Image (tube, rainbow, N blue to C red):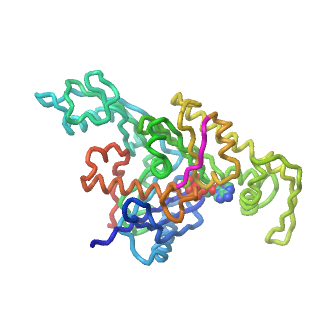
Amino acid sequence: MSKTPTIAAIDIGTGVVKAIIVQKQPEETGFKVLGRAESISAGVRKGVVADPERVSKIIQSTLEEAKKEAGQEADEVYANINGMHIFCLSSKGLISVSRADQEIAQEDVDRVIEAAKTFSLPPNKEILEIFPREFIIDREKGIKNPIGLHGVRLETEIVVVGGFVSYSRNISQAILNSNLQVNDLILGPIATARAVLTNQEKELGVVVIDFGAGTTAISVYEEGDLLHASVLPVGANNIRNDIAIGLKVDIETAEFIKNKFGESILGEKSTKKEKLKLSTGEEISFQKSELRKIAEPRIGEIFEEVEKELKKISRNRLLPAGIVLTGGGAKTPHLVDFARKKLGLPCRLGVPRRFFPLEEDTSYSTLCGLVLSGMDLEEEEGGKLNFKGFFSGIKKLFRVFVP
Ligand SMILES: Nc1ncnc2c1ncn2[C@@H]1O[C@H](COP(=O)(O)OP(=O)(O)OP(=O)(O)O)[C@@H](O)[C@H]1O
Ligand SMILES: [Mg+2]
C-alpha cells in the first residue's frame, strides 16, 4: 500500500507564524496533526510581508520545527498571501459560442472568463485570483456549469481578488529565500473560509471574520460562491496598543493584561480592582471598568468597519447564515455575543473541524484551511475534480520552485 502523503502549511501572520504537518486519516475521518510549531512573527506589517529576509528565516525555522516534531518531511507545502492591499471587484464578460452545434465547451468558458478579465488596473495592481459566480446562457441566469449546455450567447460574472504587485513580490521573495519548495500561495481569507464554513452556510449567505493580530480579514459567500473579500488593517494588536497607552504599561504587559483579564472587556461590568506584579518587580493596579473603557470602543470600531464592508455589497444585516468568527482575537470572551448585537446577525465561532488535536482552536483556522485548499488544488490537478475543481474557487496563484 502506498504511503498517505503528508501536507504542510505555513500561515504567515502579523502576530504569529504557524506551521503544521498533517496526514489525512482513512475514510474521511479528518486529519492527524503530526507536527506543529509557532514563532513570534517579525517583518510582517498588517498581514503584508514588509521585510522578506526576516520573514524567510522565520518561516524556514518554524517549518523545520514542525518537521522535527512530525519526524518526517512534507510532500506538499502551502503558504498564504494576506494583507490590507488585497482588493475585490466584480466584472462581466460576454462571447458568442464558437461551435456550430452551439454546444458550450471548456474553450468557450475560458474565453468568456478572459473577456471578463479585460478591465483596466493601475500598473501597480494585479489579479491574484478569479472566482466565477455564475454563467448566463442566452439570458438564462444562475448557471454554475455551462459545459455541455447549448446556446448562442455566453455571459459570466466573476469576482476578482487582486493585490499590490510589490507586496505579492515580497512574499514570493520570502519564500524563495527560505529554500522551501512551496507548491502554492493561497489567499488567506479564502483558506480561512475553507476551514470553517459548511456548504449550507456558503449557500445561504455568510460572512467569515478572521480577527487576527494586525488584520481583520472578511470573506462573504452566497449561493455557494465568493461574493466579497477584504482585509482591514486593524486587529487585536490595536486593542493591545490602546491598553499600553491607557494603562501606561509596556506592550508585553498590555498583551498579557488583554488576554488574562479578557473577561472584563466585554463581560459583566465591575468596579473591582486588579493587581498585577510585573517581571520587573513593580506592581500595577487598575480597575476592571478602566480596561473595558479602553478596549470596548476599539472592538466596536473594528466591527463598524466590518459593517461598512457589508454595506458596500448591500449585505449588512442580510446574511441568513450570519457571522462565523475566527482567528486568535476571537478568543476574547463574549465576542460572539458582542458581534451578534453589533452586526445584527447570528454568530458562531469558527474552528478547524476534523483537525486533531486543533479542532477547538480559532487561531488555526487559516492554517488548516491552507491544507484543505491545497488538497483541492491537487485533486484539480490530478483531474479528479476537473470542472468542479475550477469552481472550488482556488486556483494556482503561481508555482514557486527552488532555483
Ligand atoms: N485568549 C486570548 N484572548 C484574546 N485574544 C487572544 C487570545 N489569545 C490570542 N489572542 C490574540 O490573537 C491574536 C493572534 O491571532 P492570530 O494568530 O489569528 O493572528 P495572526 O494570524 O498572527 O495575524 P493576522 O491574521 O492579522 O496577520 C493576537 O493579537 C493575540 O493577542
Ligand atoms: Mg491570521
First to last magenta residue range? 345-351
Residue at the (50%, 55%) spot, across then down: 366
Residue 350, placed above or below residue 157? below
Front one among 160 and 27: 27
Front one among 304 and 333: 333
Residue at the (53%, 69%) spot, across then down: 37
Q: Quadrant of ligand 2?
A: bottom right
Residue 372, placed above or below residue 110? below
Residue 58 lies in the magenta stretch: no
Residue at the (46%, 54%) spot, across then down: 369
Front one among 3 and 71: 3
Residue 14 shows in the view: no
Q: Position of residue 196 (x, y in %)?
A: 50, 50
Residue 396 shows in the view: yes
Q: Position of residue 83 (x, y in %)?
A: 52, 49
Q: Position of residue 86 (x, y in %)?
A: 48, 44
Q: In the rendered view of the protein, which quadrant contains the C terminus? A: bottom left
Residue at the (59%, 33%) spot, across then down: 308
Decide if residue 293 is on the left or right side of residue 146. right
Q: In the rendered view of the protein, which quadrant contains the N terminus? A: bottom left
